[in-house]
Amino acid sequence: MGQRSSSPQVAHITEIERVLNGQMSTRDDVVVESWKRCVREHGLDPARSQPAYIVPDSQLRAHREQSERLISIARSGIENLFRQVAGQNYVLLLADRAGITVDFFGDPAFEDDLRRAGLYLGADWSEDLVGTCGVGACIATGQPMTIHQSDHFDVAHTPLSCTAAPIFDTGGNLSAVLDISLLRSPQPKASQHLALHLVTASVRRIELANLMATMRRDWVLRLAHSPEFLDVDPEAAIALDASGRIIGLTHDAASILGRADGKGLRAPSAYIGAPLSDFFDIGIDDLPALTRGRAAEDRVARLRDGSAIFCHAIAPTTHRQSIRAPARAIPAPLKALGGDDADMKSLQLKAARLADEPLPILITGETGSGKERLARALHQSRGKPGPFVAVNCAAIPEALIEGELFGHAPGAFSGALSKGRPGLIEEADGGVLFLDEIGDMPLALQGRLLRVLSEGEVTRLGEARARPVRVKTVSATNRDLGALLESGRFRHDLYYRIAAATLALPPLRARTDFEWLLDRLLSAIGNERGQRLRLDSAARLALIRRDWPGNIRELLNVLNVAAAMCEDATITPEDLPHDATANSAPLPEAGQTAGLAQRARRQAPLPGSPAGPVAETATNVAELARVLEACNGNISAVARRLGVDRTTVYRRMKRLGLMH
């Protein structure tokens, strides 16, 4: 083994060696077994200390993307737990099944210390890398536990106290670990009993939330031994198909079923497919009587071991209910594009319906408004996505674009590859071809693209043989294609081939979910930088009041600059780059405000009409129209004059019918 140094380290190494030699230990069995795995299976040396390892940002993003749904479901439960332990110096980590920390809650005042200790976003706590630790041992055993100070294998981690509990998915597979840790604890291991109780309770609620979110279209039976907690904080839950067979359950439900049939605790997956009647004196036909229509104390069933348990049955979400709540049917990639903005919600719903259709889609919107993000979300929302190939028609030199799109045969032209190569259209076969800035495609090339889209075949340069391709085209432009069509710079027949359906992205200045988007982008930038960034109120207001002609791209650039300039992860107005457009073009567009007063007069009440809400609304229309005209339509100026945010002005304009 490696070089030994100070006495505490020597004592720790010596104890591990005694355990490996079979001597008795006062440590918990999970600690002893983990020490043995560290040496015998993972090849670790207790004498070789390793500092905490934070994975690269790109790797962290990949792990977070894979865990995105779980992070979303778990976050409220983790936030509640963090509030419960506020002021006690605890850190909360959510690690995925590989041991990578994908979410983190800690005191920013100790950020440097937490990062050095590995109690931070992106830390790798897999047992084969860092040895015995809360997350790693929990993944290895599937059991909740506390790894306290010198329980850790590596002496670098012996100041820590880590309490962890596993999170299982509805099929009984371990999917994550929730860990609550201290940088240092002068107290004995028994002091962490409360932490163990809190983390296991939080995990139970996360598993329940996950099952409810996953099994909406099936019967769910929630269970509790006390009627008082049945409807507000149940102990376990089981999901059932239409025949009454178990299709999902929480880990605690497996414990209840194991006692019910007398066979003891088994892996949750062992219960999948079993009839409910194997464990209860009820079947699928009895569930309607256990819904909330009756008092909790009357909703009781008997387990096969004779014990009683209180039940709350939740009926499946019907097809009719799904139609009434279309937002639930919007795929996550599309839903992530917008918050509570009416135009974005309408666009998301339309995009969700079009994603799996073979129809070509044209996305329009100002520069930086998120056209490629929408295209990628459409691709990710398809049942069978296939490849996503993006082509920027404005960025490829005209002399090269034909070869890039269609590919070439061997030696087709000077500089051609000796083996030839497929073009971007072929590479998109079976997936999505994204034609960005389609309005800038050279006119001569538009005819060749039209033939590919019409015939479903592509011919490489220098070849006579046509190759079949099947692509869904999503095109995007910030140009006025109508004007290009009129001037003859864009082919009418190609336009109708790429624009069977059109999705129009609103400019950022017109979106009422600006703050939702702001917080989401800030969080993403913070995650990439390993910081929990925040905006002070003055900086937030300054951003809200900007006009954002560069839209989301401009906002992202501003936030990245501010993140680089700020201190202590708090962005102030001094950290924001100068707004070069602070006094620029009025909004709405020229000509739009000219009719506002006239429109207000048309909406005003007739003389002698009754007073009330309608008259009040009409008065507001007239007042807002006068302010808009006085400010030449500049929304920022209107907001400053009224003492409100720009988003409030836009909401009022939409509500009062002053926007097209």
Image (cartoon, rainbow, N blue to C red):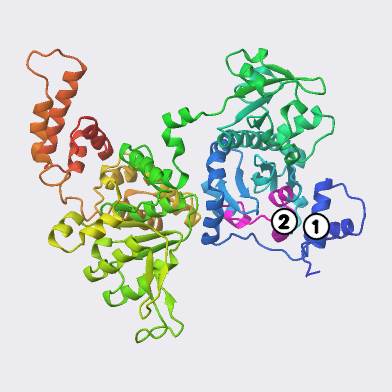
Residue 464: give x, y in percent of width and height. 37, 78
Whether label 1 touches label 2, CB < 8 Å: yes
Residue 471: give x, y in percent of width and height. 41, 60
The 10 Å Cα crowd at callout 2, few under 14, some 14 to 19, many 20 or more, is many
Question: Helix, strand, or loop for circle 1?
Answer: helix
Q: Calculate the distance from the C-alpha at mark 1 to the C-alpha at mark 2.
A: 9 Å
The C terminus sits in image quarter: top left
Residue range corresponding to the magenta coloring? 115-139
Q: Is residue 126 magenta?
A: yes
Task: Decide if residue 254 is on the left or right side of residue 83.
Answer: right
- Residues 105 and 626: in front is 626
User: The residue under label 2 is which amino acid type?
Assistant: Glu
Residue 474, visible in the rendered structure:
yes
Task: Decide if residue 426 is on the left or right side of residue 231.
Answer: left
The image quadrant that residue 55 belongs to is bottom right
Q: Residue at x 82, y 23 (%)?
A: 305
Residue 195: give x, y in percent of width and height. 68, 37
Q: Residue at x 79, y 32 (%)?
A: 258
The N terminus sits in image quarter: bottom right
The 10 Å Cα crowd at callout 1, few under 14, some 14 to 19, many 20 or more, is many
Q: Which sits earlier in the primary sequence, circle 1 or circle 2? A: 1
Q: Which mark is residue 381?
A: none
Please name the residue that numbered disc 2 is placed on.
127
Q: Which mark is residue 37?
A: 1
Q: Is residue 214 above or below residue 361?
A: above
